Image (cartoon, grey):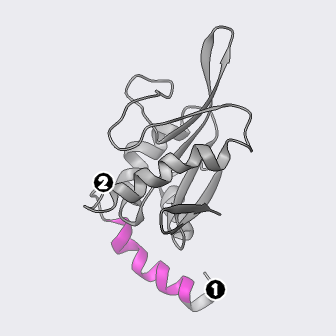
Amino acid sequence: MNSHTERQTMLKTAPVILDHVQTMRQIGKQPIHDLVVRSVPQLWQSHVKCSIAINPGSEQNMWAGMPDLYPDVVGWVWRNGRRELLWIAAVETEDTITLAKARSQWKRYAALGVPFYLIVPLGFRDLAAMVAAREGVKVNRIYKYSLNGERVLLI
């Protein structure tokens, strides 16, 4: 946010956004979400020293320490003959940065004891930080993404 007035406006309207309990992604947003999820391994592979697995849409390719947890992006390594979870990232769209999402997923991911990252649309970092703080979710870093056609830019 660029100005004090913009921050004040966001904070005044935030309770309306924060009280929204729907966690389903709006029609038309799922392809954007999945494009970002599928792009993360390509964007991060040269920066991390681990394997990266993804769970776009309803796919359940890699669990995160519990049989019913399938975060969007998972960093892991083989150690002593088994998979060891190193970090988790959740990709959100404008409509899924809610208290309900923080309660139902972010809290569970953050409780696994590995770094937890959020990847949100450009312009939604402050809202994501506020939602996480309000729910007591420790987020190690919030990345922002923007789209240039079919190309994802991670900031």
* Residue bearing the label numbered 1: 2
- Residue at screen point 50% across, 38% down: 109
Q: Is residue 135 magenta?
A: no
Q: Pick the quarter of the image with the N terminus.
A: bottom right
* Residue bearing the label numbered 2: 23
Give the amino acid type for the residue marked by disc 2 in the picture: Thr
Label annotation for residue 92: none
Q: Pick the quarter of the image with the C terminus.
A: bottom right
| Residue that sits furthest to the bottom in the current view | 5
Is 41 situated left or right of 60 in this image?
A: right
Q: Main secondary structure of the magenta part?
A: helix
Find the magenta span and give its range.
6-19
**Label 2 crowd bin: few (<14), some (14–19), many (20+), radius 10 Å:** some
Residue 30 location (% of width, % of height)? 33, 55
Q: Which secondary structure, mark 1? A: loop
Residue 137 location (% of width, % of height)? 53, 49
**Label 1 crowd bin: few (<14), some (14–19), many (20+), radius 10 Å:** few
Is 31 situated left or right of 117 in this image?
A: left
Residue closer to the observer: 124 or 153: 153
- Residue at screen point 27% across, 54% down: 24
As drawn, 6 above or below 72: below
Total label count? 2
